[in-house]
Image: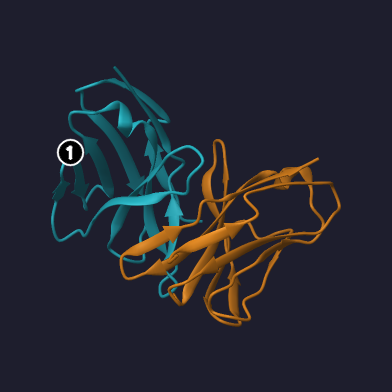
Amino acid sequence: DAGITQSPRYKITETGRQVTLMCHQTWSHSYMFWYRQDLGHGLRLIYYSAAADITDKGEVPDGYVVSRSKTENFPLTLESATRSQTSVYFCASRGDYGYTFGSGTRLTVV
Amino acid sequence: QQQVKQSPQSLIVQKGGISIINCAYENTAFDYFPWYQQFPGKGPALLIAIRPDVSEKKEGRFTISFNKSAKQFSLHIMDSQPGDSATYFCATYSGAGSYQLTFGKGTKLSVIP
């Protein structure tokens, strides 16, 4: 199916563990983005990528790492998860008609 | 840090009424102003957008009004329906070239029968 898919849909992890959230798009869009959504804060940009091997920080990058070895994949890694990183994470890509978002990953850090 | 101020935070409207959500921005890197709609458990989806060469754009029951001099734009939902109950986000573009979206904090709309 065409679109943007995120996995896993739900994840519970322990403080200090490394966790990777996956994002895959089928359109070959150049730009991809990671946002986190928290009550009272709306959607905040974590990292974005203009193309394979080109990434840059957004508003709230601390504690996160991204990579983009292939155009279609843009994984987000929490190197050492903290409780403050409990959130819903959305991946998006930008096409001719604006942004398309995935369905999100709900991450709980305990 | 670019800011987009959205109000109200929550809104309760009776079925058939008009829902109005407002946004004010400081700067924009690209003159294109979208609104996103998000249902629980889903990602935001583009609802409607406007370019500032027009002051108003209408798509069905949804209308964007834009005031460039005041740096404000608003979403009007006419004849609001329970199916419109969702969270709505306005956004502006920042970062010339990268066109990152900066979102307002969202408005949770509840349309009651």
Q: Please report the residue visible at 42 percent of the width from the left and 60 percent of the height from the top.
A: A100
Apparent colour of chain A = orange
Q: Is residue B46 above or below residue A24?
A: above
- Is residue A23 at all visible to an observer of this figure? yes
Q: Give whichever of A94, B6 is nearer the camera.
A: A94
Q: Residue B105, position in %: x, y?
A: 46, 41
Vertical comparison of B30 with B43: above or below: below
**Which residue is pictured at 45% across the width and 77% down the height?**
A28
Badge 1 density bin: few <14, some 14–19, many ≥20, Cα 10 Å: few
Kind of residue at badge 1: Arg
Q: In this rendering, would A20 be left or right of B108?
A: right
* In this rendering, position of residue B41 left or right of residue A18: left
Q: Secondary structure at mark 1?
A: loop
Which colour is chain B painted? Answer: cyan
Q: Position of residue B14 (x, y in %)?
A: 27, 18
A7 is higher (above) or lower (below) than A70: above
Q: Which residue is mark 1?
A: B61
